[in-house]
Image (cartoon, helix red, strand yellow):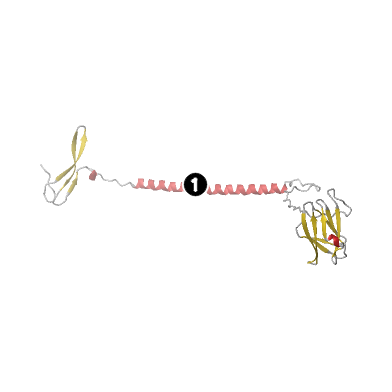
């Protein structure tokens, strides 16, 4: 006989769940529903399960356990702080001891007074060598040729006018001597040597090795006063 709705008396519809068992299956009823008034009944038995609230003793025990756990965590944290402070104290003590030991240790061996500390080698200045004329003795004779002494001054230029245009051979040496009481400058226009300031009785010499014509100026106080040439012939 079909069950009736307790509210309206309508026939209830039973809903089932099919469970497979081996080769067949079984339908398990799970609920009854009234389509007229929507009344329903749970057939699984889950609605009859009543959750039993915890007793006061159980609740008190649970709270006490939480409190103990909190106290344990606080104690562990309190232990960590003293340990950290202890480590810092030990480090500071070691630093103080190291400073005292360093202060009383003998310093490095001092070097004897006669020994200078080794310095890194400084960059060697580059020395530019030029074919500047060397101040040779008037009486010196070059092994490659003859020596020609040319006397000059600021007023007359060349004392011996024949030496204004001098003809020589390769390997010959020319010596210019200032025969004046005042200084003058001898300039090589071909750049055989740097401009040479000659005081009284000072001289400059140059050995001519290449064939050609070479020009020279006598300059006084920055002004060219006289010019001459040296012709090197084969």
- The location of residue 217, given as percent across then percent down, is 79, 62
The quadrant holding residue 50 is top left
- The location of residue 8, given as percent across then percent down, is 12, 51
- The location of residue 40, given as percent across then percent down, is 18, 48
Q: Is residue 194 visible?
A: no
Which residue is nearer to you in this view: 196 or 158? 158
Determine whether the residue tagged by mark 1 lies in a helix, strand or loop.
helix
Extreme-top residue of the structure? 23
Horizontal arrangement in the rendering, residue 46 relative to residue 60 (left or right): left
Q: Is residue 167 above or below residue 156?
A: above
Residue displayed at 35% across by 45% down: 58
Residue on which disc 1 sits: 76
- The location of residue 158, given as percent across then percent down, is 85, 63
Of the 4 image quadrants, the one containing the N terminus is top left
Which residue is nearer to you in this view: 214 or 183? 214
Extreme-left residue of the structure? 1
Q: Is residue 218 above or below residue 2?
A: below
Which residue is nearer to you in this view: 159 or 3? 159
Residue displayed at 77% across by 57% down: 213
Residue displayed at 86% across by 53% down: 147
Extreme-front residue of the structure? 234
Horizontal arrangement in the rendering, residue 151 relative to residue 45 (left or right): right
Q: Is residue 161 visible?
A: yes
Which residue is nearer to you in this view: 63 or 190? 190
User: Count of labels shown?
Assistant: 1
Residue displayed at 34% across by 47% down: 56
Q: Residues within 10 Å of mark 1 (few under 14, many from 20)?
A: few
């Amino acid at each position: 006989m079909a069950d009736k709705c307790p509210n309206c008396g309508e026939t209830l519809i039973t809903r089932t769940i099919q469970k497979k068992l081996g080769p067949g299956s079984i339908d398990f009823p799970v609920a009854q529903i009234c389509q007229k008034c929507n009344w329903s009944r749970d057939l699984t038995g889950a609605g009859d399960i009543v959750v039993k609230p915890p007793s006061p003793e159980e609740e008190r025990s649970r709270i006490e356990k939480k409190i103990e756990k909190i106290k344990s965590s606080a104690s562990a944290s309190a232990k960590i702080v003293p340990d950290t402070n202890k480590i810092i104290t030990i480090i500071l003590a070691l630093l103080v001891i190291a400073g005292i030991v360093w202060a009383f240790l003998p310093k490095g061996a001092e070097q004897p007074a006669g020994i200078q500390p080794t310095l890194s080698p400084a960059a060697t200045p580059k020395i530019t060598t030029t074919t500047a004329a060397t101040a040779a003795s008037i009486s010196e004779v070059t092994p490659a040729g003859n020596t020609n002494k040319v006397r000059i001054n600021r007023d007359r230029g060349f004392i011996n006018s024949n030496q204004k245009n001098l003809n020589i051979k390769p390997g010959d040496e020319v010596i210019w001597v200032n025969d004046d009481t005042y200084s003058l400058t001898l300039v090589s226009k071909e750049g055989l040597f740097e401009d040479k300031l000659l005081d009284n009785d000072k001289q400059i010499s140059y050995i001519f090795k290449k064939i050609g014509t070479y020009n020279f100026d006598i300059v006084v106080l920055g002004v060219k006063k006289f010019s001459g040439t040296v012709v090197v012939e084969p």
